[in-house]
Image: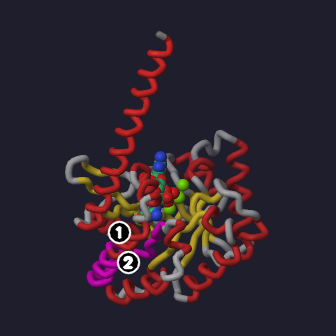
């Protein structure tokens, strides 16, 4: 009897696995359809000067506007898109949308600062990235100086010589570079010095509990001091209240992003925020 149950359990489990696999495949097929139908949209989260409170740019954040399920956030599709080898194509659509929006800001004379785009590891490591970037920005007549790329520590630590080469090429083409989610990877300070990046974005997990958590506050203070020594700008992620903002001001952090100022919003809303 126990054996019988065991067998049933096994079959039940197995059937679930199949359902799971079928769901994944269906989801992947939907991602492909989403690319064909251009269902991806970009929201912009303002980057704000800590000292002046003025908007200095924005980060472009991709969303999947699913025809049946509504707005889907990156945590629910970026991983699968990476596994399915579709992240590069999604990234290209994001770049295209951002350049179109920048071209619009330029046409109407909006001062938008600089727009940051998140790069996936696959995009960053792609030897053909720069050539494609050049084509897209030339098509939209957008200067490379209007675009920043956010890369993560893990993307540059595996093969840092190659990574430095790719960063140098992007910098030489006039793009700005920043290290995203700083503090969550394992970059050593020695390498950081050699990376041709312009800014560090301190991960939200370090900002969340300041100033109450004295360890986190000390870390933020130390990161800002270190970044300044290396000539880098520092951006705090995930600022949700005025107490955090005051702490960042006391730490001389340069810029911040977070729900306290605004979440990521559609381009028209961002345009209104610009005034
Ligand atoms: P990220 O680059 O670190 O982006 C910051 C994330 O934190 C965003 O989530 C943003 O909405 C959220 N956030 C901002 N301020 C706050 C706050 O005050 N509180 C809280 N709780 N959250 C805040 P989102 O848009 O869901 O994006 C998640 C991640 O997906 C991004 O993390 C980035 O790694 C990735 N991602 C977004 N867009 C793209 C893209 O176009 N391409 C690629 N490859 N990855 C993307
Ligand atoms: Mg980012
Ligand atoms: Mg980030
Ligand atoms: Mg983060």
What is the residue that sits farthest to the right in this orientation?
190
**Magenta residues?**
97-118
Q: Residues within 10 Å of mark 1 (few under 14, many from 20)?
A: some
Residue 241 point in image, percent of width and height: 50, 46
Query: Residue 21: percent from the left, percent from the top?
Result: 38, 44
Disc 2 vs disc 1: Cβ atoms closer than 8 Å? Answer: yes
Residue 131, placed above or below residue 105? below
Q: Residue at x 59, y 49 (%)?
A: 207
Res 233 visible:
yes
Q: Left or right of 63: which side holds 149?
A: right
The disc, 2 or 1, on the residue closer to the chain's N-terminal end is: 2
Residue 262 sits above or below residue 158 on the image: above
The location of residue 23, given as percent across then percent down, is 33, 44
* Number of marks drawn: 2
Residue 274: numbered disc? 1
Towards the viewer: 181 or 66: 66
Is 174 situated left or right of 159 in this image? Answer: left
Q: Which residue is mark 2?
A: 111
Q: Residue furthest top?
A: 1
Q: Answer with the quarter of the image where residue 55 lies.
A: bottom left
Instruction: State which quadrant residue 63 falls in.
Output: bottom left
- Relative placement, left or right, of 237 versus 194 is left
In the picture, the quarter occupied by the C terminus is bottom left
Vertical position of residue 21 compared to residue 32: above or below:
above
Q: Nearer the viewer, residue 72 or 206?
A: 72
User: How many angstroms separate mark 2 from mark 1 (CA)?
Assistant: 7 Å
């Amino acid at each position: 009897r126990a054996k019988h149950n065991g067998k049933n359990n096994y079959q039940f489990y197995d059937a679930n696995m199949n359902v799971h696999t079928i769901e994944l495949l269906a989801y992947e097929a939907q991602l492909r359809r989403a690319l064909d139908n251009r269902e991806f949209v970009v929201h912009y989260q303002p980057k704000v000067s800590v000292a002046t409170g003025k908007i200095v740019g924005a980060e472009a954040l991709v969303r999947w506007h699913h025809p049946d399920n509504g707005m889907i956030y990156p945590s629910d599709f970026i991983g699968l898109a990476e596994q399915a080898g579709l992240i590069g194509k999604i990234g290209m659509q994001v770049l295209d949308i951002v350049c179109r929006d920048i071209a619009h800001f330029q046409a109407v004379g909006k001062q938008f600062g600089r727009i940051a785009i998140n790069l996936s590891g696959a995009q960053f490591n792609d030897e053909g990235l720069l050539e494609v970037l050049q084509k897209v920005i030339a098509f939209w007549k957008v200067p490379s100086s209007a675009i920043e790329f956010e890369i993560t520590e893990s993307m540059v630590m595996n093969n840092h010589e190659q990574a430095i080469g790719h960063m140098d090429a992007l910098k030489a083409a006039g793009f700005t570079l920043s290290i995203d989610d700083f503090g969550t990877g394992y970059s050593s300070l020695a390498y950081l010095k050699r990376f041709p990046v312009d800014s560090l974005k301190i991960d939200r997990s370090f900002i969340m509990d300041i100033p109450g958590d004295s360890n986190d506050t000390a870390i933020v203070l130390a990161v800002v001091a270190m970044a300044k020594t290396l000539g880098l700008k520092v951006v705090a992620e995930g600022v949700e209240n005025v107490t955090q903002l005051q702490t960042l001001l006391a730490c001389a952090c340069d810029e911040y992003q977070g729900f306290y100022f605004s979440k990521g919003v559609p381009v028209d809303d961002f345009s209104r925020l610009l005034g």
